[in-house]
Amino acid sequence: MNIVVTVLLAAGLFFFLVGIIGIIRFPDFYSRMHPAGMLDTMGLLLSMLAIAVYILFDHFSYLSVFSSLKILLIVIFVYITSPIASHAIMDAGVRAGLQPWTREDLTKEET
């Protein structure tokens, strides 16, 4: 059980790390939204699943079952709200007039 929890936590941390690197490395607002969405959905799913498995199997009682169900409800809530929030943020960027990054922007920066 400890191996499963460790693997799930490591995978969750991997998604958090890759998402953070993507946010730093991508050039514009629109392309940074993709790793931001992956960061909170997959990273949260795997790390919270590890916590739920640990609570459920390490301290098995009726309270641990309810705690695991609460954690899974949090994950479901994030899965429902994350795409809506990403779309709303993207729409706010469009309405604010943010332009997507193009190759011409790269050549302007070099000169």
Image (spheres, rainbow, N blue to C red):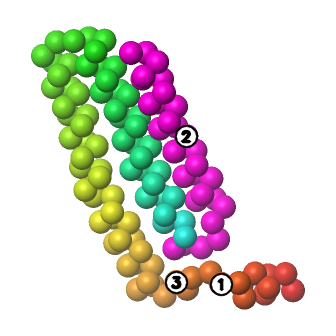
Q: Are marks 1 and 3 in contact (CB under 8 Å)?
A: no
Residue at point 20%, 34% (across, down): 70
Distance from Cα at disc 2 to Cα at disc 1: 29 Å
Q: Compared with residue 98, is residue 75 higher up or lower down, i.e. above or below?
A: above
State the image quarter where residue 26 is shown. bottom right
In the picture, the quarter occupied by the C terminus is bottom right
Q: Which residues are magenta?
A: 1-30
Q: Position of residue 41 (x, y in %)?
A: 39, 50
Of labels 2 and 1, earlier in sequence is 2
Residue 104 is left or right of residue 79, and the answer is right
Please identify the dominant SS of the magenta region.
helix
In the picture, measured across the screen, residue 28 lies left or right of residue 78, that is right
Which of the two marks, 1 or 3, is nearer to us in this view? 1
Extreme-left residue of the structure = 62
Q: Tell me if label 2 and label 3 are in contact, CB under 8 Å.
A: no
The residue identified by callout 3 is 98
Left or right of residue 109: residue 88: left
Indicate the secondary structure of the residue bearing disc 3: loop
In this view, the residue farthest toward the right is 111
Pointer 2 or 3: first along the chain? 2
Near-viewer residue (8 or 61): 8
Disc 1 and disc 3: Cα gap in Å? 12 Å
- Please name the residue that numbered disc 2 is placed on: 14
The residue positioned 35% from the left and 71% from the top of the image is: 87
Location of residue 95 (image quadrant): bottom left
Residue pointed to by mark 1: 102
Three-letter residue code for mark 1: Thr
State how far apart marks 2 and 3 are (Cα): 30 Å
Instruction: Say if the magenta span includes residue 28.
Output: yes
Question: Residue visible at 60% across and 57% down?
Answer: 22
Amino acid type shown at disc 3? Leu
Whether residue 44 sits left or right of residue 73 in the image: it is right
